[in-house]
Image (cartoon, helix red, strand yellow):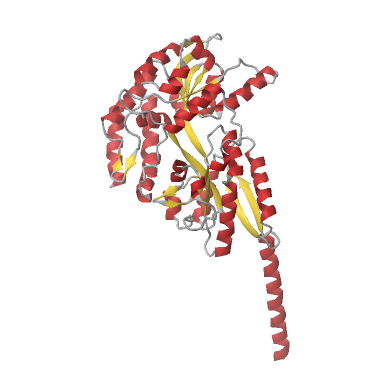
Amino acid sequence: MRRGISLAMIMLLVASVILGCSSDQSASGGGKDVVKVWTFPVHAEYEAELQELIESFEKENENIKVEYEVLSWAEGPQKFDIALNSGSPPDIFFGKPLGKYVDSGLAVNLDGKLNVSTDDYNDIALEYMKVEGGLYGLPIYMFLHVWGGNKQMLEAAGIDYEKIQTEGWTWDEFRELAAKGVGKNAAGDDTYGLVFQGVNEELLVHLAMNNGLPYRFTEEGTTWNDEKILETMEFIRELVDTGIMPKETAAIDPAKRMELFYNHQALFFGRGIPYFDPVVEAHNEEIKAGKIEGEEVNFVLLPPPHNEGEKPVTLGGSEGYMLFTQKGAKEEHVANSVKVLEHLTGAEAGAAASALAYGQVHKDAIGKFEVPLAPYNETAAEVLTSHILPPNGASAEATAKDDRFQSEVLAPTFQGLISGELTPEEALEIFKKKGKEIFE
């Protein structure tokens, strides 16, 4: 009897092992180590590029299988946060390192784990992939969040946009030129000197950076608590009150901003990015082909104006892929994930930077991809890139506090300012009070 029980137990254990192995193989791509990648639609053709990168990697690494998922920009960040908080993030995630990722204990510091040299990457781009000096990812491009203009309207108004692109412009110069855009277009619609997305606070960020406040916070707290931020908010209210910006700016989202641009209702607009150049050209081709109605327009890349006496600053940084681990992950799996991350951010990945009309961050990719920019915008992009500052080097704790300041204070306060519910003075008092509470 005991022998029968022992045999049954043995058979059960064997079956359990077999089933377990079968389950593990299914979960690990038929015996291969599966590395999971979550990303975003970086540009229209990025998924096809990603598939090619994965295919070339798997050919050279037959023991590794790469599985990817393309998340939506709207819901993806929240989905990742849920996965991270549950202790089961993907191995590789697209974006830029945040203090909360590091605080989770699941973001992997790449220092000492890389097989490639960081000397192959742009120095400032690498700095934006660090938190408290630790490297948590590798970049694939440097982004520029700047302004743009309607080339036809600019030329009709006699505005020398190429001078602005190379030399910059002051708030006073901008105010004078933007006034030329206020009126009616051929269809009888209202036109504006500046149309900016008002559903977030980026306009305030751009102008504050160019008014002697390049960084919103330090280890001591928010810097948005003095006369400079007040002056910036007063300038924005003036633009709305004088009609240079639409009264309904608080409700303008990126889609509405582009609609007004395409309808020749915006002389200047923001946010603008280099990628708008090929996007607008594609829009023009659809008009020529009769697929959509409208009048052709060309995009001009422009810097935000700076206040007199202040240095011009470009809001920019880098994005790429970060490495994460799961509770109990084996070192071999982490090492394999590093290999995947390196491949997704190597020279071949320069195709994404090129498609987005950004400069290359991997030195071996420089000059190997065609950048879809008009010549005058190429010059502007070079100047704007040179005005990107390195990150302020604040600690993860201070960064997390600023994240809270941004979501709880900055976003709603700017909405109140731009809608006229708050005066600049009232907004400043909120920044002072809430900033002190959060950073204490």
**Residue 421 rendering spot, x and y as whole percentages:** 35, 27
Q: Residue 409: which quarter of the image?
A: top left
> Which residue is found at the position 70% from the left and 53% from the top?
59
Q: Count the marks.
A: 0
Instruction: Tell me if I can see residue 222 in this picture.
Output: yes
**Residue 183 rendering spot, x and y as whole percentages:** 46, 10
> Which residue is found at the position 31% from the left and 35% from the top?
224
**Residue 41 rendering spot, x and y as whole percentages:** 60, 39
Q: Residue 42: which quarter of the image?
A: top right
> Which residue is found at the position 30% from the left and 43% from the top?
221
| Direction from residue 433 to residue 404 in the image, left or right | right
Pick the quarter of the image with the N terminus. Answer: bottom right
| Direction from residue 423 to residue 371 in the image, left or right | right
Against 407, residue 169 (above or below) is above
Q: Nearer the viewer, residue 270 or 387?
A: 387
Q: Nearer the viewer, residue 307 or 30?
A: 307
Instruction: Tell me if I can see residue 200 in this picture.
Output: no
> Which residue is found at the position 58% from the left and 31% from the top?
371
Against 25, residue 127 (above or below) is above
Q: Nearer the viewer, residue 119 or 328?
A: 119
